Image: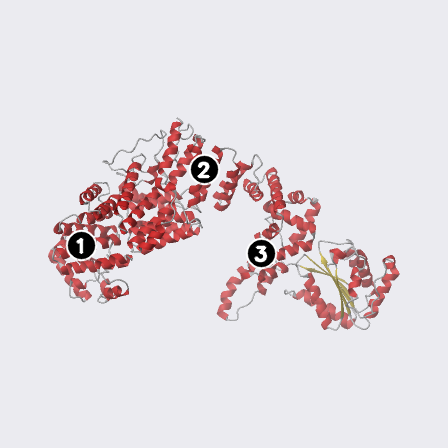
């Protein structure tokens, strides 16, 4: 039994007085349901039996309330044979003489043994039995008789004046069992025996006691059940205890509890009386009983105390009846002026949209839930509203809003939600008010062609995008500055003209939302993007501008600068439990890692995004993430895995979207790796056509020309390959180190050895600046090969060792094998580190020494180093001499291949 020291002390004193001093008493134990009345009564009986008393037990039941003297019949099983007379016949039972005779028999029995009479559930005992109990109490005042009666404090049973009668007795002892307080619950929790553990447990014990109290209200029955559930979290035992409490309160209270569970925060007495059909006074009494039992929410809230209690009550209702209750509750809430969120919650539970006000209420409530950070609730309301729309225009508007909301959790679902509005637009069923938002939503998903088609329909309507107000239909999509605002945004000056597109007069071309800034803004764009990210918060309206800023930072300022920001926003999306947003930022994070040559990290990040997605089988955005993973796996030499990843289904919409270009590039790289050069070339040329048509032709983002040139080189089309590479070096991105380095590496293969050597040396310098270790390893591998061709084997060996080490760091095992055949795996690591100088010695190098040593590792001669660092050859020689001495190595061949720049200027 739960600790009730004061009550136990009183009980012991009464038992001692009855058994030893012939002091009679009548104890009335009252309390709310579940507060331990029956348990207290059983404790009293056990204590009495230990003292040698005769215990006569009985309990009232609703079924026996109509049977007179049912309690007297139960005593016969506990009393000695013949000690008590049988219950009198109904026609004589009410006579005073019969009552006196029965009381005298009890008094006579107490002369030989103390008698303790225990009657449970007094509120269910029939009226005649109660009159006998009162008569026994009056006639045994000086006998060894103790009566312990237990009943509800809120149900007076068959005789509502019983308590008044008992109060007249001088030996009457009232006892109220209340719910347990927080401190009592805290005292019940197990104590740690170890002193350190005890100190540690003490800090969390208060919080655990608070949690248990919040779930149970201190009701002993609920508390015991909760402690039986796994980890003391509301489960099956807790739910059954809640239902047991309600059942003990009676049918009327069960019906009222159902109404409370349905109404929840709307559970006012008036609403409860209306929904349950009970008089308001009866509803008040039932509420009082439930509150006393701790089943209701604490002051300041309405409804049941815990969501698990509400779920237990709702789950036992008949589905049709439950829906009817929710429908009625929705009407009550609407009539009483309740917030739209409360009304919509009832409509959703009832799956009811038959009222003319239902649709606007559902849409309004969805917006409010979004503002409160409850996207799942908002999506559920919009789904219900979508099915209730009376026409195509309204259904399209709700579908577009639903797509925006679903994008937080499921990118594929968000794309799917636009299918119906897009079909309606194609059939000419949508007006300008719906076409503008649809174009905006499509552009946000990167579906450029479809967005343009919708805008053309809007232009054909000969109205301004905002329905006559002159607004841009893409306005509000991005809070981040849009640098490019024309259909040819980002296109090189010599690019072919894009096909004529008729857009509304004020409309921005959808591709502009995916374009990098152009001169003169380009020089400050990266700084502006980072400033924006510093103050950006993650919410529904900021996901697209944040992604736009990250893309700008990634492609204009380098992956190294963008990486921590991608990690930050991917982490924020995970904390917000938004898999859709995780796909956006996780995809950018994987791309940043791939651009830095972290092949394993890119594959792992992309894989995590795909695994977390609710619908891993499809989606344009998820297809782009999968494409990043494919390219990483291909670079690592894992062709089978890459092929399996590439086989995932890709929606038809991908071919007309920005994200589809990533899939084309991954497919082209896989075709290159599997010697299907014509197929690869076709994919790369398709990318070029799309990028030119959309005005997004930026090699920094997607260098399709170098990809096509590589395919052409494999096909033996050197002249065509040279044309593509030369063309890339005329674009506005030609000065970018990554673009220039990768282009020079391929172009060098078309030159004679001496010219190839110089060109590859420049490619290595550019790629070192870019931060892409994988592309740097490829360039250094080619550089080492050409050094051997021109008769510099020692220098070639150093370069190849460095290239092999870089490739190993990236996880590019196939490239490692090409550079140093037979030196992959564990043996490679041993070869690489066998003669490596101690890390402490490397750290002792000055910045100037490290700068010179790094260029030497890259294969530059002393003269080339001097030229690059603007110092004399003699100074280079002096620096290298000090490096050799500090590292205790004989010469260049002993320089550590894992030497990294120690200052930002070298990166």
At 69% across and 45% down in the image, what residue appears? 278
Quadrant of the rendering where the N terminus is positioned: bottom right
SS category of the residue bearing label 3 = helix
Q: Residues within 10 Å of mark 3 (few under 14, many from 20)?
A: many
At 13% across and 59% down in the image, what residue appears? 877
Q: Is 683 displayed left or right of 653 in the figure?
A: left
The residue that label 2 is drawn on is: 420
Q: Is 67 displayed left or right of 809 in the figure?
A: right
SS category of the residue bearing label 1 = helix
Q: Nearer the viewer, mark 1 or mark 3?
A: 1
The image's mark for residue 95 is none
Rendered location of residue 39, percent (x, y) = 68, 64
Q: Nearer the viewer, mark 2 or mark 3?
A: 2
Q: Is residue 119 above or below residue 591?
A: below
SS category of the residue bearing label 2 = helix
Rendered location of residue 363, percent (x, y) = 51, 38
Count of numbered badges drawn on the protein: 3
Q: Is residue 182 visible?
A: yes
Q: Residues within 10 Å of mark 2 (few under 14, many from 20)?
A: some
The residue that label 3 is drawn on is: 215
The residue that label 1 is drawn on is: 783
Instruction: Give the CA distance from mark 1 to mark 2.
Output: 55 Å
């Amino acid at each position: 039994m739960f600790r009730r020291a004061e009550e136990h002390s009183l009980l012991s004193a009464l038992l001692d007085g009855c058994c030893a001093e012939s002091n009679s008493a009548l104890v009335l134990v009252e309390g709310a349901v579940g507060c331990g009345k029956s348990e207290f009564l059983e404790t009293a009986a056990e204590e009495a039996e230990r003292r040698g008393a005769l215990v006569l037990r009985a309990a009232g039941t609703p079924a026996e309330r109509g049977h007179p003297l049912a309690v007297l019949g139960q005593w016969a099983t506990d009393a000695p044979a013949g000690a008590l007379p049988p219950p009198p016949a109904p026609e004589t039972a009410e006579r005073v003489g019969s009552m006196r005779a029965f009381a005298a028999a009890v008094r006579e029995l107490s002369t030989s043994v103390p008698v303790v009479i225990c009657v449970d559930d007094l509120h269910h005992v029939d009226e005649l039995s109660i009159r006998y109990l009162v008569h026994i109490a009056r006639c045994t005042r000086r006998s060894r008789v103790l009566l312990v009666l237990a009943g509800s404090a809120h149900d007076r049973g068959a005789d509502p004046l019983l308590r008044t009668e008992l109060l007249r007795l001088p030996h009457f002892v009232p006892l109220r069992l209340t719910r347990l307080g927080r401190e009592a619950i805290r005292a019940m929790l197990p104590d740690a025996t170890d002193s350190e553990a005890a100190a540690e447990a003490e800090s969390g014990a208060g919080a655990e006691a608070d949690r248990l109290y919040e779930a149970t209200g201190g009701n002993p029955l609920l508390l015991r059940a909760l402690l039986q559930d796994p980890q003391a979290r509301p489960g099956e035992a807790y739910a059954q205890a809640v239902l047991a409490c309600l059942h003990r309160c009676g049918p009327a209270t069960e019906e009222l509890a159902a109404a409370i569970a349905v109404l929840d925060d709307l559970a006012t007495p008036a609403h409860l009386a209306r929904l349950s059909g009970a008089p308001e006074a009866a509803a008040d009494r039932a509420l009082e009983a439930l509150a006393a039992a701790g089943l209701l929410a604490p002051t300041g809230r309405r409804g049941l105390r815990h969501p698990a209690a509400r779920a237990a009550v709702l789950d036992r209702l008949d589905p049709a009846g439950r829906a009817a209750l929710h429908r009625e509750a929705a009407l009550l809430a609407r009539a009483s002026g309740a917030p739209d969120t409360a009304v919509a919650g009832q409509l959703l539970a009832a799956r009811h949209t038959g009222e003319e006000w239902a649709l606007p209420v559902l849409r309004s409530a969805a917006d409010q839930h979004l503002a409160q950070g409850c996207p799942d609730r908002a999506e559920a309301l919009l789904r219900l509203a979508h099915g209730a729309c009376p026409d195509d225009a309204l259904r399209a508007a709700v579908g577009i809003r639903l797509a925006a909301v679903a994008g937080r959790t499921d990118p594929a679902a968000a794309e799917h939600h636009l299918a119906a509005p897009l079909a309606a637009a194609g059939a000419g069923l949508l007006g300008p008010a719906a076409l503008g938002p649809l174009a905006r939503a499509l552009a946000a998903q990167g579906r450029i062609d479809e967005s343009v088609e919708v805008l053309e329909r809007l232009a054909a309507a000969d109205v301004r995008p905002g329905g006559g107000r002159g607004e841009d239909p893409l306005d509000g999509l991005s809070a981040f500055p849009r640098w490019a605002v024309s259909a040819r945004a980002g296109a090189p000056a010599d690019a072919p003209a894009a096909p004529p597109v008729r857009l509304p007069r004020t409309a921005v071309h959808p591709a502009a939302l995916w374009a990098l800034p152009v001169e003169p803004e380009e020089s400050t764009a990266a700084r502006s993007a980072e400033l924006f990210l510093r103050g950006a918060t993650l919410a529904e309206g900021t996901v697209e501008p944040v992604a736009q800023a990250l893309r700008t930072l990634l492609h204009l300022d380098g992956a190294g600068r963008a990486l921590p920001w991608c990690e930050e926003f991917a982490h924020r999306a995970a904390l917000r439990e938004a898999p859709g947003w995780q796909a956006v930022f996780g995809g950018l994070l994987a791309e940043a890692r791939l651009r830095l040559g972290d092949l394993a990290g890119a594959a792992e990040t992309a894989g995590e995004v795909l695994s977390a997605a609710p619908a891993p089988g499809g989606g344009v955005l998820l297809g782009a993430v999968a494409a990043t993973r494919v390219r990483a796996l291909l670079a690592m030499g894992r062709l089978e895995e890459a092929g399996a990843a590439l086989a995932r289904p890709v929606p038809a919409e991908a071919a007309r979207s920005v994200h589809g270009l990533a899939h084309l590039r991954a497919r082209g790289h896989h075709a290159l790796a599997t010697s299907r050069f014509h197929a690869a070339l076709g994919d790369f040329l398709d990318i070029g056509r799309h990028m030119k048509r959309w005005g997004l032709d930026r090699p920094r983002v997607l260098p399709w020309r170098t990809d096509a040139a590589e395919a052409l080189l494999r096909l033996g089309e050197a002249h065509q390959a040279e044309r593509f590479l030369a063309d890339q070096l005329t674009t506005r991105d030609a000065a970018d180190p990554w673009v220039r380095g990768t282009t020079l590496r391929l172009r060098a293969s078309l030159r004679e050895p001496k010219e190839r050597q110089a060109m590859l040396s420049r490619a290595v310098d550019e790629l070192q600046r870019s931060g892409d270790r994988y592309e740097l390893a490829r360039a250094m591998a080619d550089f080492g090969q050409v050094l051997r061709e021109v008769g510099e084997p020692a220098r070639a060996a150093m370069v190849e060792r460095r290239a092999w080490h870089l490739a190993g760091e990236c996880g590019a095992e196939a490239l490692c094998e090409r550079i140093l055949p037979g030196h992959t795996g564990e043996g490679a690591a041993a070869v690489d580190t066998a003669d490596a100088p101690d890390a402490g010695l490397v750290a002792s190098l000055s910045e100037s020494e490290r700068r010179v040593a790094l260029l030497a590792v890259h294969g530059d001669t002393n003269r080339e180093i001097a030229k690059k660092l603007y110092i004399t050859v003699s100074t280079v020689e002096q620096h290298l001499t000090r490096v050799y001495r500090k590292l205790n190595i004989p010469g260049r061949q002993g320089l550590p291949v894992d030497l990294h720049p120690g200052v930002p200027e070298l990166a």
